[in-house]
Image (cartoon, rainbow, N blue to C red):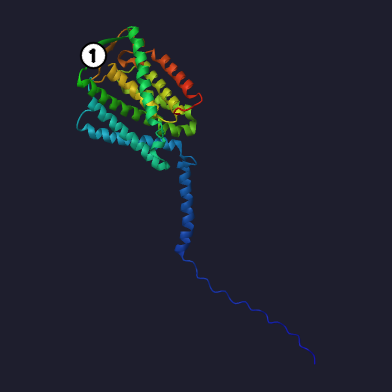
Amino acid sequence: MGSKAIVPKRQMSLPRPCEAPKKLSSLKDETAVPLLDRRGKAIRRVFFSSRGLHAVWGVFFFLLTFEIVESCLTNLLGHYFSLKPNGLIPPALALIRESCELLAVVTATWTMARIENVSMFSYGFTDRHRIGKFGAGVFWGVLSLSLLVLVLWMSRMLVFDGIVLTGLYTWSYATIWLLVFLLVGLFEESLLRGYLQYKLSQTVGFWYAAAILSVAFALMHLRNSGESKLGILSVGVGGILFCISLRFTKSLFWAVGFHTGWDWGQSYLYGTANSGLMMEGHLLASHPSGNPLWSGGTAGPEASAFLLPLFALAALCMWLWWARPRTNRFN
């Protein structure tokens, strides 16, 4: 009996279940998310780089925040008393003015630090030797000014008229002016050698940024009525000196200390003009004599031509001291 070939049955494929059509809203979600993501990345590229906020935006937002806060504070206080006194500047008014300016720069620095996700102290104020560097800066600030005053006195370009303060007033004015000029040092160094120096250095390099901000530092003093052209130049050179200290010490504490000691010595200790301004309550009374080119005239000792070689000598000493190998001393 013949065998019948067994033909396997053809396997039938089951029909696929019908897929429900996607809703229009889900289609929109899938296309919208990548679109928003792309737009977010594009916007982020405009404002941020791998090193944080782009320098141009960082400088702009920092200065904008500073100007807004300072304007609000000065306009508010201006309703109660004048912030531009005639004649000698009293310490109480100076304390209020400098506190407002410092608050404005602290607010601007804090805002930029939040945007860049870092500590606000990272712009020049992180140093374990802060007390030593600040104290050394105060010492060299007073000493450098004293050397300049000695040269002016010996060359008869500066005349002392005697002691003005006695007793308790000597110490009270010394203390309050020291506090005022500490605020001045913190404000000006934070404004011009803090965040702005850090951010501009990312784009143009440290020394170009130092030059730009030192020019800005000098131009800030144009609003002082008694300032001179040589005084403006000296302020700019002083800015470079502070940048040298920042470069070597990696912080602003020495510069703040020097700034404090220098201004305190001019305004309180020797009773001279400070960038064209005279303060109330100084220990000694003095007045310039002779050619303003050498005496400084109404601008004070820092507008004297003797200051430029002094600053050059200071820069050389800073380089020789800080550039040599460091052993068992603060950096």
Q: Residue at x 46, y 49 (%)?
A: 40
Left or right: residue 295 versus residue 323 is left
Quadrant holding the N terminus: bottom right
Q: Quadrant of residue 268?
A: top left
Residue 126 is situated, as x and y percent measured from the top left of the image, at 41, 35
Type of amino acid under label 1: Ile
Q: What is the number of callouts on the image?
A: 1
Residue 168 is situated, as x and y percent measured from the top left of the image, at 20, 22
Q: Quadrant of residue 10?
A: bottom right
**Which residue, as the protein is rendered here, is positioned at the far right?**
1
265 up-or-down from 60: above or below: above
Residue 151 is situated, as x and y percent measured from the top left of the image, at 36, 10
Determine whether the residue tagged by mark 1 lies in a helix, strand or loop.
Answer: strand
The residue wearing badge 1 is: 163
Instruction: Work out whether residue 300 can be spotted.
Output: yes
Instruction: Work out whether residue 277 can be spotted.
Output: no
Q: Nearer the viewer, residue 37 or 119?
A: 119
Quadrant holding the C terminus: top left
291 up-or-down from 71: above or below: above
Label 1 Cα crowd, 10 Å radius (few <14 / some 14-19 / many 20+)? some
Left or right: residue 200 versus residue 156 is right
Left or right: residue 307 versus residue 174 is right
277 up-or-down from 287: above or below: below
Residue 245 is situated, as x and y percent measured from the top left of the image, at 43, 25
Q: Nearer the viewer, residue 79 or 118?
A: 118
Q: Nearer the viewer, residue 159 or 295?
A: 159
